[in-house]
Amino acid sequence: MDIDEFTTRHAPTTSEQPFALETEYTLDVAVDGSVSAKAGSMVAYDGDLSFTGRASASGGITGFLKEAATGEGTPVMTVEGTGNVYLADDGKKVQVITLGARDSITVNGEDVLAFESSVDYDISTIDSLAGSFAGGFTNVYLEGPGAVAITTHGSPVVFEPPVTTDPSATVAWSRTTPNVEVNRSLADVVGQESGERFQMRFDGTDGFVVVQPYEERGGP
């Protein structure tokens, strides 16, 4: 293709939605006020925007963990003003979910890309997974209303409970709560250092669990 065809084919598109996929790997956020995003995820922007990183959020929330094994923190980034910001995270696919006023979802802290200012959030750790993930398994509880963008390595599969998942491949869940189990026989087969000896059991008949075709070997 010539240069005009190239620029036309790959030019940004317009959308009526505040969160829209520019590509499978890039999120276009129309900012009119403020949004929260994973620090370092901005790849481009236009308009009058400012970016403020913070190591903690209001109410004593400590922010996302980039790498639990080292304790290195990835702070939440606030984007303020009017314009469009384009976000991406290490070539991972972006999934946009719109939460209603009573909807909520819990997401692996590493897989939260952005969320609207109307979304409340809190952060917790599943300490029973500390034997597999140094520092435990950090997740972010997000409650609507508002749009949320999460990321996955490859295309996700969404299961309905009951289902058992590998914590290393578990991205998010909603309207269900995991119980952590240890598969002793599997530990004997694959070795004591494998995360696969830990499993997350989701019971009940409601909700869903998001799993990616990739295992985060280093922890969340």
Image: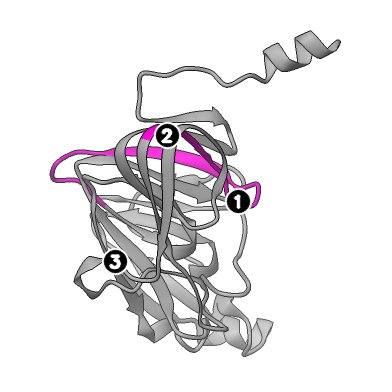
Q: Amino acid at mark 2?
A: Asp
Q: Residue, x 34% and y 56% (percent of image)?
A: 173
Q: Residue, x 44% and y 50% (percent of image)?
A: 51
66, above or below 211, in the image: below
Q: CA distance from mark 2 to mark 1?
A: 32 Å
The majority secondary structure of the magenta stretch comes to: strand
Q: Which mark is residue 48?
A: 2
Residue 91 inside the magenta-drawn segment: yes
- What residue range appears in magenta? 82-104
Toward the viewer: 49 or 151?
Answer: 49
Q: Nearer the viewer, mark 2 or mark 1?
A: 2
Callouts 3 and 1 close, C-beta under 8 Å: no
Residue 175's x, y, as percent? 23, 54
Residue 189, quarter of picture? bottom right
Q: Which residue is mark 3?
A: 57
Residue 195's x, y, as percent? 57, 78
Q: Amino acid at mark 3?
A: Ala
Q: CA distance from mark 2 to mark 3?
A: 23 Å
